[in-house]
Amino acid sequence: MATAPLRLEARAAIAYESVVPWIRAVLRGQKVLARVKPDGSFDADGGRVEIRYKASDPRAYRAGERNLERIPGEALLPDDAVVAGAEVAKAPARKEKEERSNARKADAATKALAPGAVPKDAWTVYADGACSGNPGPAGLGIVLVAPDGETRLEGYEYLGTATNNIAELTAILRAAEIVPRGAPFVVHTDSQYSIGVLTKGWKAKANQELIANVKSALASRSGWRLVYVPGHAGVPLNERADELAREAVSRRASRLPTVSAAD
């Protein structure tokens, strides 16, 4: 008995899937080729996407989907636009280093969320920066929770062209400006750089004026503390601050809560 012919939609889907598995994207400022699904979205497995640095290079790598940026107007590419290849295995030392890093991040996230991590009379702040390219269009996001645990303020600010470090520092500056005067506060940030230059005596070659301004703003307040919290480690309000920072970049707009709203 003859096999029934494929329906037109099925044939079209098969043909489409065979010719659009790649797209050009940007990974940390560098152009790459990334795997996509038939609808053009990134083909992520466990949050990671197969990438190639060159179409002629058979070495395949994995990149976090959140670190990949679409290039406006880029067309989808057929499968044969990139040579067949195999994923490059991570060296044992690199795997061990990554495992230790993940363990430290999990521990930091647990401490940030532990009961009593923020004093009862203090505001809880999550401040984050985002940058599309480095430097590139940058923004900050901030989430503030009052000591009552119920009052929550959030907002974002577009900073124009800037670096990620500038966005992170400015987010902390806004925290010092927005929290009501006289109220203690704990700022959670995933920027080790910011904590280092503001509280650990790290020497900074760049952003010296901004660093001085942030230090001055913090010094004018009492009862503040900076706490490291790892990005994308399951800390909800830190994830929200990141979303807001990215919204500032995508909207090219600002919407910050005011001091009077926080009182």
Image (spheres, grey):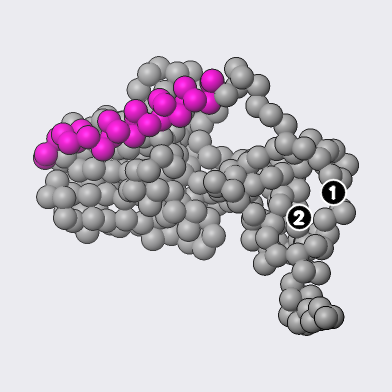
- Total marks shown come to 2
Q: State the extent of the magenta-drawn residues as a range.
A: 96-121
Front residue of this view, candidates 92 and 194: 92
Question: Can the viewer see residue 240?
Answer: yes
Residue 155 against residue 162 in the figure, above or below: below
Q: Position of residue 85 (x, y in %)?
A: 81, 40
Quadrant including the C terminus: bottom left
Mark 1, residues whose alpha carbon is within 10 Å: few (<14), some, or many (≥20)? Answer: some
**For the point 47% across and 22% down, which residue is it?**
100
Q: Indicate yes or no whether the magenta region holds residue 110.
A: yes
Badge 1 amino acid? Val
**For the point 54% across and 46% down, which residue is it?**
46
Judging by the rendered image, the residue that carries numbered circle 1 is 82
How much space separates mark 2 and mark 1, taking CA atoms? 8 Å
Q: Which mark is residue 98?
A: none
Majority secondary structure in the magenta region? helix
Mark 2, residues whose alpha carbon is within 10 Å: few (<14), some, or many (≥20)? Answer: many
Q: Is residue 5 left or right of residue 245?
A: right
> Residue 61: which quarter of the image?
top right
Q: Is residue 30 left or right of residue 114?
A: right
Q: Position of residue 150 (x, y in %)?
A: 16, 55
Check disc 1 and report its element: helix, strand or loop.
Answer: loop
Q: Indicate yes or no whether the magenta region holds residue 4.
A: no
Judging by the rendered image, the residue that carries numbered circle 2 is 22
Front residue of this view, candidates 114 and 140: 114
Check disc 2 and report its element: helix, strand or loop.
Answer: strand
Badge 2 amino acid? Trp
Q: Is residue 52 left or right of residue 131?
A: right
**For the point 76% across and 55% down, which residue is it?**
22
- Whether tag 2 and tag 1 are in contact, CB under 8 A, the answer is yes
Q: Is residue 18 left or right of residue 164?
A: right
Q: Earlier in the sequence, mark 2 or mark 1?
A: 2
